[in-house]
Amino acid sequence: MSTKTNGTCTNGTYTNGKTLVLSTQGSSQDALKAEERYSAKNYQSLPIVFSHAQGASVWDPEGRHYLDFHAASTALNHGHCHPKLVATLVEQASRLTLTSRAFHNDIYPQFAALVNKLFGYDRVLPASTGAEASETAIKIARKWAYKVKGVPENHAIVLGAAGNHHGRTLATIALASDSMSRDLYGPLDPNISCTIPGTNRHIEYNNKAALLEAFEAAGANLAAFIVEPIQGDAGVIVADDEYLQYARALCDQNNVLLICDEIQTGIGRTGKFLGHYWSGIKPDLVLLGKTMTGGMYPVSCVLGNDEVMLTVEPGTHGSTYGGNPLGAAVAMRALQVVGEEKLAENAERLGHVMRDGLREIQAKTSIIETVRGRGLLNAMVIDQSKTNGYTGIYLCEMMKEKGLLLKSSRTGIIRISPPLVVTEDQIRWSLGIMQECIEELLQLPPV
C-alpha cells in the first residue's frame, strides 16, 4: 500500500508529506537496508532476517530454514510461536489487554497467586522487562534497608559480582564490570557497584574470599547482594553450588538481602525450574523475566516475602504495563506448559547430550578451549589465537550459511541456548554442523 499525504492523517497514518509504503512482506535485503537507515545502532546483529518461526525453526523472507540455537538470549524457552501460548494470547487479546494498576482486572490476581505458590513466596511485584525487574529489586532492597534494617537514609549499598548482567538502565549498569555497558553513561551511583567498597577491585564471581572482603568493607550499610546463578552474558559461567550457599550464609549473618537474578536461568533453562535450586538455597528476592511468556509478550517480576515486599507503599512505585491481563494470562499458561511438557527435564537430558557432543568435538581439535554449562545453557570457548586470524563471530557466520544460528562474543565465547522444545535429533544435527564448520575454518588461509 502506498499513500501520499501533506502531513495529515491518511488511512490512519501521518507521513509529513512523504510517500509511505506499508508492507507485511519484503526481502531480507529490504529489511536490512531499512534497519540500517532508520534504526539506532545499539546492536550489532548477524545479517539474517526472521520472517516466521515455529519451535526451534526459523525461516527468512526467501524461505531459507535455520535452527535458532540462540533463542533470543533464553527468552524463547518454549520455542517460537508455541501453539498453546498463541491460543492464550489471541483469546485474551480479544477480551481485555490493559487496565493499568489504577483499576483491577480479573487475570492478574490469578497470576499473582500462581507464581507465589509455585516458587514459595508471599508477594509479587509485576513489571515488563528484566532490567525493570532488576532496578525494582534494587529499590525494594533500599527501602527495606531504611525501614527495617535501620540503614541511614541515602547510605544503603547494593553490591553485585563482576561479570553479572542485570540490564542496561543506569542502576543496572552500575552493577556491570564491562566497559561497553558503562563508558560515557556516567556518573553512576557509587553505592550500586560490583567493586569492593573503598577499592577499585572487582568482586570476583564465584570467589568466596572476595565476597567476604566486600561484605566486611560495606559494613552495616549493605542492603543487598545480587547475583546470577549462572552468568549468561559473561559466557555461561556456572557458580559452584557452595558459592551460592556461602552467599546465603553471609547474608544471613549480616542481615543482608540475597537477590537471585533468574532472568536468563529461570523457567526450566538449567534443568530445574530455577537455577538456584541446584544449590538448595532460598533467596530473599527472585527476579524473573525474558521467557515468562515464552517470547509472546514482555513480562517480568520480583518475588519476595512480606517483610521485604510490603515496605513498598502504595504510590511509591509503579509500572503501567506491570500486571496487565494480556501478559498475565500468557505468563500463567507459559508456566503451566513447562510442567505439562516437562521442559526442565528435557533441558537436563539434552544438556548432557550437547555437552558430551561438544567435548567429543573438543577432543578432535585444538581450538575449543572450554566447554561448560548446565541444562540447555551452554558455551564453547574458541581459542582465537589458534584460528589463523578468524574469530568466533566468523565461525558463527559460517554456521549460519549451513542453517545453524549461534552468537559469539568478541572474545570467542559461543553461547548455545536452544529452545527447551528442541529435539535430540536437532541437537545432534547442530553438533555435526559445528564440527564441520570448525574443520573448514582450520583449512582456510591465514588472514
Image: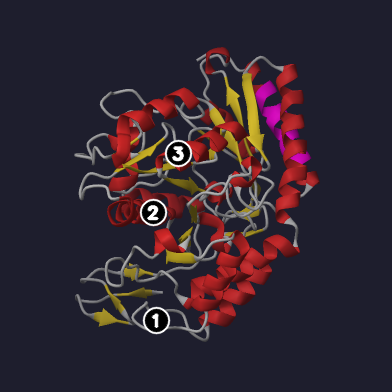
**Residue to which mark 3 is pinned:** 253
Left or right, 422 with reference to 167:
right
Left or right, 207 with reference to 154:
right
Q: What SS does tag 2 mark?
A: helix
Residue mark closest to the camera, 1 vs 3: 3
Q: What SS does tag 3 mark?
A: helix
Q: Where is residue 405 drawn, in percent x and y?
A: 60, 42
Q: Where is residue 174 drawn, in percent x and y?
A: 30, 40
Q: Residues within 10 Å of mark 1 (few under 14, many from 20)?
A: some
Which circle's residue, 2 or 1, is located before the other in the chain?
Answer: 1
Q: Where is residue 229 drawn, in percent x and y?
A: 55, 40
Which residue type carries mark 2? Ala
Which circle's residue, 3 or 2, is located before the other in the chain?
Answer: 2
281 shown above or below 85? above
Which residue type carries mark 3? Gln
Which residue type carries mark 1? Thr
Q: Considering the whole magenta stretch, tell me its main secondary structure.
A: helix
**Residue to which mark 2 is pinned:** 137
Q: CA distance from mark 1 to mark 3?
A: 43 Å
Residue at 51% over, 55% down? 290
